[in-house]
Image (spheres, helix red, strand yellow):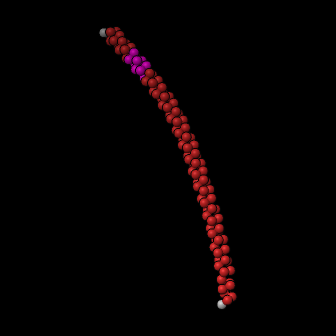
Amino acid sequence: GDRRRRAWPEREAAEAEARAQLDRCRSAHASELEELRARMSAEEARSLRELSEQCGKEQAEAAQAAEAERGSLRRRLDEAEAELEEARAELEASRADLASSRLSLASLDAEAAAAAA
């Protein structure tokens, strides 16, 4: 029994040391965990920024491409309208020629009728 009593304070000291070491480990791991969390948050923020920038670039490129396409379509429309105006002018000229030809034909018909009479 005497030996047990003497071992008791040593055992308590050893347990206290073990608890202290465990607390130090927990504290160190908690610090490491916080540091990792902070690093992960920073990395996530950086990734989100990069994604946002990339999306912004892609959006700007898409808008630029759409504007170029609109410009191209506008030019084609202008060309088509010019061709249409040209065709209308040719049609009017053809109608005028046709009217003139009809007048000439009517005049010839009248002359032929007069000559036959």
Residue displayed at 63% across by 73% down: 19
Rendered image quadrant of residue 18: bottom right
Residue 85 falls within the magenta-colored stretch: no
Residue 76 in percent (x, y) is at 50, 31
Quarter of the image with the C terminus is top left
Quarter of the image with the N terminus is bottom right
Near-viewer residue (73 or 5): 5
Whether residue 76 is visible to the viewer of this picture, yes or no, is no
Residue displayed at 43% across by 24% down: 88
Q: Which residue is situated farthest in the bottom direction here?
A: 1
Whether residue 75 is visible to the viewer of this picture, yes or no, is yes
Q: Is residue 91 above or below residue 74?
A: above
Residue displayed at 55% across by 43% down: 56
Q: Which residues are magenta?
A: 91-100
Residue 38 in percent (x, y) is at 60, 56
Residue 43 in percent (x, y) is at 61, 54
Q: Which residue is situated farthest in the left direction here?
A: 117
Our reading of the magenta stretch's main secondary structure is helix
Near-viewer residue (78 or 98): 78
Decide if residue 86 is on the left or right side of residue 22: left
Residue 96 falls within the magenta-colored stretch: yes
Q: Is residue 14 above or below residue 107?
A: below
Decide if residue 103 is on the left or right side of residue 43: left
Q: Is residue 49 above or below residue 99?
A: below
Near-viewer residue (74 or 34): 34
Q: Is residue 72 above or below residue 106?
A: below
Near-viewer residue (16 or 38): 16
Rendered image quadrant of residue 53: top right
Residue 112 in percent (x, y) is at 35, 12
Rendered image quadrant of residue 23: bottom right
